[in-house]
Image (spheres, rainbow, N blue to C red):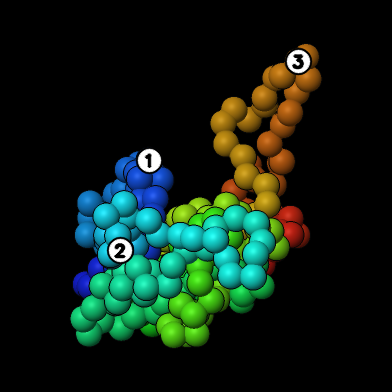
Amino acid sequence: MRDTKKKLQFNIVTIFPNIFDSYLGDSIICRAIKGKKISVDFFNPRDYTKNKHKKIDDKPYGGGPGMVMYAEPVLKAVEAATKGNKSTKTLMFSPSGKQFDTKYAKKLAEQYDRIVMVSGRYEGIDARVKKILKPEEISVGPYVLTGGEIPAMLVIDSVSRQIKGVLGNEFSPENERVASSEVYTRPEILKYKKKNYRVPKVLLSGNHKDIEEWRKKKNKKKFM
């Protein structure tokens, strides 16, 4: 787990920074920002265009559906987002990229001081951006989304959890506790539509060894 006085910086290249407002303004991530454990900044390619209408896309060469984002404004936005001497990792999102998981999130938190994420839109970004930047391509799942903003939020959330103090409970990170696919809280007996639903007896036993064994059996996925 990342344990440092330096805050982890997330720089997002996106033409829709306002999408992040609600997500960053509430709950754990909001507290992490206020507590200066992380920072999130935005770099809008529209601010780096040369045309007066701030146009950032055009029809693809060779024909085809949709629009493609210009290379130059994206490259300039990434250049601004990576300026300085911080240890930086640049990511782009792709369904065919490396599968993002908790193990990789931990690696990002421990090895870098700044993570730059390029969020594409429409039919994608001019392929020359990828050739020039040589970013690491990652996938958050085997599906296609309308843009890279949701994957960027996912990465912020998962990586931030690996920073000491963000969750507020040292036993909360998945890689430091026995996680279970089933969790319960009060009341001990839930009455719903004339049926009683009880908490498993083992969880009420106080026997931590038996409880851990029960949780291990219930686990469907082991966090790396």
In what element is the residue under mark 3? loop
Neighbours of disc 3 within 10 Å: few (<14), some (14-19), many (20+) = few
Q: Is residue 28 visible?
A: no
Give the residue at x 57% y 65%: 60
> Amino acid type of disc 1?
Ser
Q: Residue 209: give x, y in percent of width and height.
A: 64, 61
- Tell which circle, 3 or 1, labels the residue nearer the N-terminal end: 1
Q: From the top left corner, tell me how far across and down residue 10 is, in percent.
A: 34, 65
Residue sitting nearer the eye, 170 or 52: 52
Q: Left or right: where does residue 24 sit relative to residue 37?
A: right
Relative placement, left or right, of 122 versus 170 is right
Is residue 14 rendered to the left or right of residue 211?
Answer: left
Comes first in the chain, label 2 or label 1: 1
Q: Position of residue 1 (x, y in %)?
A: 41, 73
Q: What residue sits right under mark 1 in the picture? A: 22
Q: Residue furthest top?
A: 194
> What residue is drawn where x is 50% and y is 85%?
131
- Residue position for label 3: 193
Tag shown at residue 49: 2
Front residue (pair 149, 59): 59
Q: Is residue 54 left or right of residue 202?
A: left
- Determine whether the residue tagged by mark 1 lies in a helix, strand or loop: helix
Amino acid marked by disc 3: Lys
Q: How many marks?
A: 3
Q: Position of residue 71 (x, y in %)?
A: 43, 72
Labels 2, 1: front one = 2
Residue type highlighted by circle 2: Thr
The quadrant where residue 90 appears: bottom left
Residue drawn 69% across the image and 58% down it:
143
Q: CA distance from mark 3 to mark 2?
A: 60 Å
